[in-house]
Amino acid sequence: MIIVLAGIDGAGKSTAGLLLAERLRAAARPAVFTMNRSGRRSITGWCDRRGIHPPLALLDAVETSIRCVNVLASHARAGPRAGVVVMDRYLYCQLALRHLRGLPAGRLLPFLLAVLPTPGLVVYFDVPADLAHARITRRAVDIETLEHLAGLDAAYRQLSVFPTFLVLDASRTPEQLVGDILQELGVSGVALR
């Protein structure tokens, strides 16, 4: 089974994803956690340090390529014996970014979404942009503007598949979020510290 965690930066997807895989393994269910990064932070930082400002479409094409390779690698890990594969981010994230940037979906992302196995569960971590911004500022690893976070949240909600997502209030603790996901999966008897 593939579980996708989606949402804006600072929503807590990575923390909850690691915890979810840990709790599933504790319940004797094989589980792995994968990150499907696009390299956006690294690429943007590298360009900024060198004073390079590539066209938005080129930047997006590079990010989309990296994200697609990572998603394909995550699917490869989701072989018949993998059990549950918890994916932090997915192709939906790139579609939302494209929408935010005013770019079309293109051909590659819709094609991959059509041919790859459909995730068994997509969880959208719903968090106010100001709380996500505060979390990002606290961790001091990257920088996002409040406007970007709010815009990305709106872009996710405009995806045609958004109504199929399980939306959880991500202003709560990772333990509470994981508890909700386990309940949705029908997994019981897992200690949630």
Image: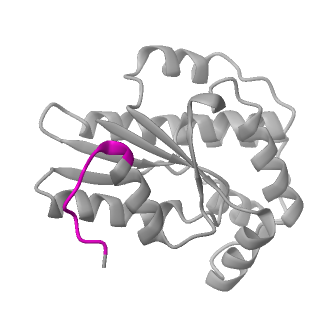
> Residue at 71% across / 68% down in the picture?
132
Magenta stretch, main secondary structure, is loop
At which x and y percent is residue 144? Answer: 77, 66
Residue range of the region highlighted in magenta in the rendering = 184-192
Position of 187 with respect to 11 (left or right) is: left
Tell me which residue sits at (71%, 40%) in the image: 156
Residue closest to the eye, 126 or 10: 126
Q: Nearer the viewer, residue 120 or 58?
A: 120
Kindly indicate the quadrant of the structure image that contains residue 148.
bottom right
Q: Look at the image and tell me in which quarter the C terminus lies.
A: bottom left
Q: Quadrant of residue 47?
A: bottom right
Residue 43, position as x, y percentages in the image: 66, 57
User: Eyeballing the image, is 68 above or below 117?
Assistant: below
Residue in the image at 82% along x and 40% along y: 100
Q: Residue at x 18, y 41 (%)?
A: 82
Looking at the image, how many numbered discs can be counted on the residues?
0
Foreground residue among 94 and 55? 94
On the rendered structure, is 79 left or right of 111?
left
Spot occupied by residue 24 in the image (x, y as percentages of width and height): 23, 56
Q: Is residue 28 left or right of residue 182?
A: left
Screen quadrant of the N terminus: top left
What is the x, y in percent for residue 191? Answer: 23, 71
Residue 99, image quadrant: top right
12 in magenta: no
